Image (tube, coloured by chain):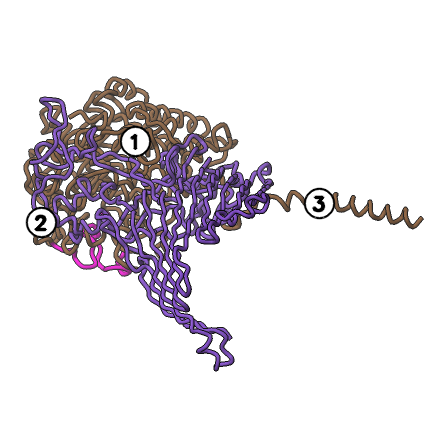
Amino acid sequence: MTRIMKRLLKLSIILITAFTVQSCKKSYLDINENTNSATSSSPNLVLPAVLNNTASNFITYFNYGAWMAGYQANAGGYSFTGSTFFTYNWNSGTNNGLFNSAFTDLRSYQYIITSTTGVNKYVLYNAVARIMKSYYYQILVDEYGNVPYTEGLAGVDNLTPHYDDAATVYKSLVTEIDAAIKDLQTYGSSSVVSALGSADIVFKGDATKWIKFANNIKLRILTRAQAGTLAAYATSAFGTFSAEGFLTEDVTINPGYVSTSARQNPLWNTYHSSYTGSNGAYAAQQIPTRWIFSFYNGTKLSDATRGALIYKNYAAGTTPINQLGNETNVSSWISGYPAWYIGVGTALNAPETQGIIKSRVMGQLIMPAAETYFLLAEAALNGHTLSGDAATNFDNGIKASYNYLQKTGANTTSATTAVLDAYLTAYKTANTGNYLVNYSAATTAAQRLEAIITQKYIALNFVNGYEAWQEYKRTGYPAISGTGATTTFVSLQSSATSADKLPVRNLYPTTEYNLNPNVPTGLSAYTSKIFWDVN
Amino acid sequence: MAPANRSFFYPAADVSFIPTDAFAFLKNSKVIDYMKIRAGISKVGNVNVGNSTNGGAYSLESTFDSQTGYGYGTGYTPNNTLVSNNLKPEITTGYEAGIDFRLFKGLVDGTVTYYNTSSTGQAIVAGVPITTGYSYYLLNTGELTNEGLETALHFTPIRKGDWKLTLGGNYTYNNNKLVSLSNDLTRIGVSNSSTIFGQVGQVYPVIIGSDYIRDPEGRVVVDQNTGYPVGKTEGNILGNTIPKNRLGLDFQLSYKGLTFSGLFEYRSNYVQYSTAGSTYDFSGSSARSAYYNREKFVFPNSSYYDSATGTYVANNSITVSDGGAGFWTSSSLYSSVTSNYVYSGNYWKLRELALSYKLPSSVLRNVKFIKSATVSAQGRNLFIWMPKSNEYADPDYSNNGADSNAVGITSLSQTPPTRYYGGTISLTF
């Protein structure tokens, strides 16, 4: 009896043990829970974060463009010896941020696209991510030409992506935008799908504005593609814009910037001061060029109003200016005052104001209304009927530029029509007979295009130099000549071998060459032009 | 790890055979005192996916970076590191065979070992092109083999009375090779390095970087007008960074209680990369930037393309347009060309010299509590002889730290090995 009991007891212990081991196996041997970082996310949490990053990274392109397009030069007191913005002596180690920042943000947009494709609930997130992906890919193509598109951004699925032909990528971007617009049209006001809501820090969930903004990006792409291998394609694609039309307002990204922590507006943070009041990275070492001043001070054009809205001490004539690459007798900044901040007060005592660097918490402008008007003006000039004639859009572009500058950080309401018209009239009067201001004075198509691109260049001054630089590459406007401080924006130290002594593209980063056997080789920064760059 | 990869088996076996014990005719041999033949085979498993800075054992999944404090609350973006969803333990299988022997009553003794190991699935963080959307990838690398020979031989030519002299040396040959990588990769940055790489089919690890465009004879092609190199190419393999040959020579001479010993070391067949080199050139403080007195010079070992004949002609006369700051500070002409800063790591080193004296027991007889006493003096890293091409530093030190796989980089920011002298008194109670 006792022996049987013992046996039973033993058996039951074994059974219990086996059962227990079985039941706790899952939690015991499961993967370690990462307590430090999230290992999964959802589109509504990624979208605002990546839009926020896009606004921050905008400064990378902004600063590069401000050097290249002649908006800024070296200030006194800083050594720029050997700077590639002086010499244009570019190699695979130069300007890598342009390439890397784009792909870094594209990682997040692609995450949204990949994780929401076929998920109807997130169709709006998917559409917005595709629009922003197209926005970024154009930026990449315009400086690098061929880039991985069909095989890019695939993570582990393709670790050595092939490079797609630049023109083909351009066409794909238009296709992608059209598809995104279609989804936004279908589901924009649907209650079945997840709304963009507060995750949309650009348009606050307004799907129609996203459609219009998508049309803006498409217009930017097609405008660039008008010359070169895509000319015929672009001409027909100009007829495919959706009925919602274009967004003629200043497009800003505002994640809810904070003035008291490291979450300030990135432009203010870089060109003015940090939230603790220390100088921003570029605040003191960069000042305007003599060249760009000539568009305000009467040398080329007279525009005291916008000049005074943009530059510190413009009216007094004491704004420090320089010719890019000149290193003798260079003015230093007005201590505590970046040249593009017109308020009175330094560091933490700098109040919000009008102009370019308005406020610590202003939304980051990524596409001004003026640019859209000038794109529409050029489309009309080339016979594409989209919205109004060329002259009206031209005038509206100038007014929109002034309108943006007169806004303050907090008060983003537009000036009244009367104020805008008065500004335009005064501007035209001050430049009587000059077709760069008075569109009707232009007598040839070339002059009209020069007027449109030159005014766009002025409107993009310290707003988006990257776009101004691409448009210079495409059109050759504003026209430059010689080596004078107001006749050219080319650096005095240029070592570029091209006719205009400017580079035409950037070179792929070294890391890409080291790790991806598919990178195009044999490129020159001075001769290997982007496909649309035919002049 | 994925459930399928959570257990592994690692056996090992060793055999040895001692002929001098086994065979009677060897036992009585006057030549061979002792001999042992041995062989071993082993398989070792190891899970090593992260470290204290990247999350250690938590780094088994891709993560998201968070943003907080903005108007929209908390946001997340995917981190730049990919993690393989099929991480496996690292398995190293190896075999080795060797022989140990002692001859002529201990006058000569030596050992020879051949080894060959193969590691598969070493978990590393590899650099990947940013066009994938990511910068790094935690994965199992594939197969890395390690083959080599270790030998040592010592003999004692003098052993007479109070005199004894032992001379000897050891020689090691080692060859690491990256046989394969997973996921169709052909090249990975080792430990996130952008200079030190593993390249399939090559010695591991190697320096990869830019080099001048060269003609078929290996000469740098220069422009017929400017004398400057015409350009550079990216992604060239510029050499392996772990020495293949290591030789040590040692001696020990003793007379009664006095012993004098020393150790020389030689390493060869590897290169190093100096990240500091371009800084020296840029600031004009390097010796090479003054070779030509900062005047125009003919680029050494160069040629130019003669379009008339379609051949490369040795360049003996075309000087660079600017031999001063215009050349030495130019990144595209000189300082960004990696191959300019890759140099031979070969060296001979007097690693150690030591002199010691053991007090004779007769001296200590009256001091009852001390059983023995030794006084010695030694110096380490006393002399180093390096080839002329090494203008930088002792190749023994690595910028990435002693425990990093990415060896072969020297920079401005680490202290080189120091020469030091010491004295020791040891007493046994």
Label 1, on which residue?
A138
Label 3, on which residue?
A21
Numbered disc in front, either 2 or 3? 2
Q: Amino acid at mark 3?
A: Val
Query: Gap between marks 1 and 3, in whole Å?
Result: 57 Å
Label 2, on which residue?
B293
Q: Nearer the viewer, residue A145 or B177?
A: B177
State which chain disc 3 sits on.
A
Quadrant containing the N terminus of chain B in the rendered view: top right
State which chain disc 2 sits on.
B
Residue A149: in sight, yes or no? yes
| Magenta highlight on residue B118 | no
Rendered purple, the chain in question is B
Q: Is residue B150 left or right of residue A356?
A: right
Query: Gap between marks 1 and 2, in whole Å?
Result: 48 Å
| Mark 1 neighbour density, 10 Å: few (under 14) some (14–19) many (20 or more) | many
- The label shown at residue A168 is none
Q: Over which residues does the magenta segment extend?
A: A331-359
- Image x and y of residue B68, in percent: 43, 50
Secondary element type, mark 1: helix
Query: Which colour denotes chain A?
Result: brown
- Image x and y of residue B71, in percent: 42, 48
What is the chief secondary structure element of the magenta stretch?
A: loop
Seen at 78% across and 44% down, the residue is A15
- Report which quarter residue A274 is drawn in: bottom left
Query: Gap between marks 2 and 3, in whole Å?
Result: 79 Å
Give the number of callouts.
Answer: 3
Rendered position, A235 above or below B143: above
Rendered position, B366 above or below A308: below
Whether labels 2 and 3 belong to a single chain: the reply is no
Q: Amino acid at mark 1?
A: Gln
